[in-house]
Image (tube, rainbow, N blue to C red):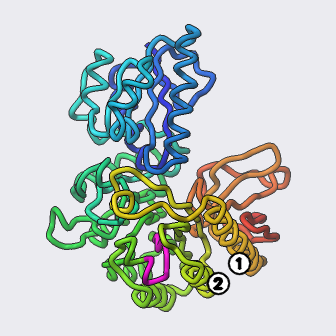
C-alpha cells in the first residue's frame, strides 16, 4: 500500500499531517507527501476551510483527485481537516465520489477506515515534511477568542494547551532528528497554558525548549495582541535562542473597527505594545496581518489604517480581504456591504505602501552581516533565512552557488550585498 497525503492551509495543518504520516510509517506504509505525480493508489487531502479562497482551493483539489479516481489513476480518496469538519454534510451530498470524509480530530477514524493499527505510543511522533533542520511545533488546539469574523472556534473548538512536558519530549525527539529551529504555532500563542496552569505559560514553555541541546532558534507565530504575555519580551531580550521575531496579527487600528471585530483591545493599547516591543528589543522584526473590507469600514477607517502602516513601518506585513463566513458573528449580525472592487483597491493600496517600506528597510541591511540558516538550493543560488524571516511567508536571502560551497541545514554568517522589495542577496563571510 502507498498513500499520497496532500496538505493545504496553514502550518498547523502541516503538523496534523505529520502526526498522521508517523502512524502510517508505524504501519509500514509507503508515503508520498504533496506529490501531484505520485503513483499512490490512495490519496488523502488535508483541507483548509478558513476563508473563501482557502475553501475554493480545497474544493478544486478534491475535484482534481475525483477526476483522477474516475480515470482509474487512483482507487481511494479521503478528505480530512477543516473543510470537512465544517461542511461534511454538504460535501457528502455534492461530492459523493470521495470515499469518506473526516474532521480535524479523528485520527483513529481514518486509520480504522484504512484497516491500520493506531499506535498510542507514537502519538507525539512526526514524519517531517519540512526540511530536516526546521519544524513547526503546534502548542495548542482551538481558540477561545470571540473575533467576529473568525470561524476557527467553530471548526477547531475551545482552546486546549498541550502540556509543557509533552512538548519538550516532542521537541527533544525533533532535535535528535536534526531539527535546529522550532517554529511555535497555535491559533493564539498568548493564551497558552491558561487552561492547564491557570496562568499564561508561554514563557515557561519557551524557557524549557531553549534548554534542549541542538535547538538554536525558537520562533514565535500568531501571538494575540491583548492580553499579551509581557514576560516574553524580557525572555526574547536576554535569550539568544529566541529569534528577535514576532508574528502578531493586529487586523486593524481604527477603534470603531476593532470594536466591531470584537478584538478586545484599542488603538492606544496597540501603540503601547509596539512601543514596548521596539524599546526593549530595538532589532525586533514584527510581522502582522491586516483585514480590509470589513463590514462598514469607512474611508476614514481605511485611511487611519494606511497611516498606521506608514507610521509603524512593519518589517513584515500581509493583508487579507474580508470573507463573509457562515456561522460567524459578523455573518449573523452585519451585511457584507463593502463592494468587492473597493476591497481589492484597499488591499492593493496597503500592499503597494508596504512594498515601498520593505524596500527601504531592506536597503538598510546592505553591508550588515546576519547569521543565516540555509534552507535549500536552486540552479543559481543557495537559499537562506536570517532569524528575522520565517519559512514560506517571509523573504529569502540568496547566496551565489558558483562562488560558495556550503551545506543545506547549517548556519553561516552572510554579508548582505544587495536588496529588493522582498528578497536579499549576500555572500558568506
Tag 1 secondary structure: helix
Q: Quadrant of residue 64?
A: top right
- Identify which residue is drawn at 45% across, 64% down: 221
Q: Which residue is mark 1?
A: 357
Number of residues whose C-alpha sits closer than 10 Å to that of mark 2, classed few (under 14), some (14–19) or many (20 or more): some
Q: Which residue is mark 2?
A: 310
Percent across and percent down for residue 284 are 54, 79
- Identify which residue is drawn at 47% across, 88% down: 271
Check whether the beta carbons of the residues at disc 1 and disc 2 lie within 8 A of each other.
yes
Q: Quadrant of residue 119?
A: top left
Span highlighted in magenta in the image: 246-257
Residue 137 seen by the camera: yes
Percent across and percent down for residue 293 are 55, 66
Work out whether 101 lies above or below 351: above
| Magenta-colored stretch includes residue 254 | yes
Q: Who is closer to the viewer here, 175 or 154?
A: 154
Work out whether 379 lies above or below 241: above
Assign the C terminus to one quadrant of the image: bottom right
Work out whether 197 lies above or below 14: below
Percent across and percent down for residue 355 are 72, 71
| Magenta-colored stretch includes residue 176 | no
Q: CA distance from mark 1 to mark 2?
A: 8 Å
Percent across and percent down for residue 256 are 43, 81
Q: Who is closer to the viewer here, 258 or 104?
A: 258
Amino acid at each position: 500500500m502507498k498513500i499520497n497525503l496532500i496538505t493545504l492551509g496553514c502550518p498547523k495543518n502541516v503538523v496534523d499531517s505529520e502526526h498522521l504520516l508517523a502512524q502510517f510509517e508505524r504501519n509500514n506504509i509507503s508515503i508520498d507527501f504533496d506529490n501531484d505525480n505520485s503513483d499512490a493508489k490512495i490519496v488523502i487531502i488535508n483541507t483548509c476551510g478558513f476563508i473563501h479562497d482557502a475553501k475554493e482551493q480545497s474544493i478544486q483539489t478534491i475535484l482534481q483527485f475525483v477526476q483522477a479516481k474516475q480515470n482509474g489513476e487512483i482507487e481511494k480518496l479521503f478528505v480530512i481537516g477543516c473543510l470537512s469538519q465544517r461542511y461534511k454534510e454538504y460535501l457528502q451530498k455534492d461530492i459523493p465520489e470521495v470515499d469518506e470524509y473526516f474532521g480535524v480530530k479523528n485520527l483513529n477514524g481514518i486509520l480504522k477506515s484504512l484497516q491500520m493499527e493506531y499506535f498510542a505510543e507514537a502519538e507525539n511522533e512526526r514524519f517531517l515534511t519540512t526540511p530536516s533542520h526546521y519544524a513547526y511545533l503546534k502548542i495548542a488546539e482551538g481558540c477561545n477568542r470571540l473575533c467576529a469574523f473568525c470561524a476557527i472556534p467553530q471548526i477547531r473548538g475551545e482552546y486546549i494547551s498541550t502540556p509543557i512536558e509533552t512538548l519538550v519530549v516532542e521537541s527533544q525527539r525533533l532535535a535528535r532528528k536534526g531539527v535546529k529551529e522550532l517554529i511555535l504555532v497555535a491559533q493564539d500563542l498568548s493564551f497558552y497554558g491558561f487552561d492547564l496552569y491557570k496562568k499564561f505559560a508561554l514563557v515557561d514553555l519557551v524557557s524549557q525548549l531553549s534548554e534542549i541541546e541542538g535547538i538554536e532558534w525558537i520562533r514565535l507565530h500568531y501571538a494575540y495582541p491583548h492580553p499579551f504575555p509581557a514576560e516574553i519580551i524580557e525572555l526574547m531580550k536576554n535569550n539568544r535562542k529566541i529569534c528577535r521575531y514576532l508574528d502578531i496579527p493586529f487586523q486593524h487600528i481604527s477603534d470603531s473597527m476593532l470594536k466591531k471585530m470584537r478584538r478586545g483591545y484599542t488603538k492606544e493599547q496597540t501603540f503601547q505594545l509596539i512601543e514596548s516591543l521596539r524599546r526593549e528589543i530595538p532589532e525586533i522584526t514584527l510581522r502582522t496581518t491586516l483585514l480590509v473590507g470589513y463590514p462598514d469600514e469607512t474611508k476614514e477607517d481605511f485611511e487611519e489604517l494606511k497611516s498606521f502602516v506608514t507610521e509603524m513601518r512593519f518589517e513584515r506585513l500581509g493583508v487579507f480581504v474580508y470573507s463573509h463566513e457562515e456561522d460567524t458573528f459578523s455573518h449573523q449580525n452585519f451585511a457584507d456591504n463593502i463592494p468587492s472592487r473597493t476591497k481589492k483597491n484597499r488591499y492593493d493600496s496597503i500592499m503597494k505602501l508596504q512594498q515601498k517600506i520593505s524596500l527601504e528597510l531592506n536597503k538598510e541591511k546592505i553591508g550588515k552581516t546576519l547569521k543565516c540558516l540555509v534552507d535549500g538550493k536552486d540552479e543559481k543560488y543557495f537559499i537562506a533565512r536570517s532569524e528575522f524571516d520565517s519559512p514560506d511567508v517571509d523573504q529569502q536571502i540568496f547566496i551565489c552557488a558558483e562562488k560558495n560551497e556550503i551545506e543545506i541545514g547549517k548556519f553561516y554568517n552572510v554579508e548582505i550585498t544587495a536588496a529588493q522589495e522582498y528578497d536579499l542577496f549576500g555572500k558568506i563571510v
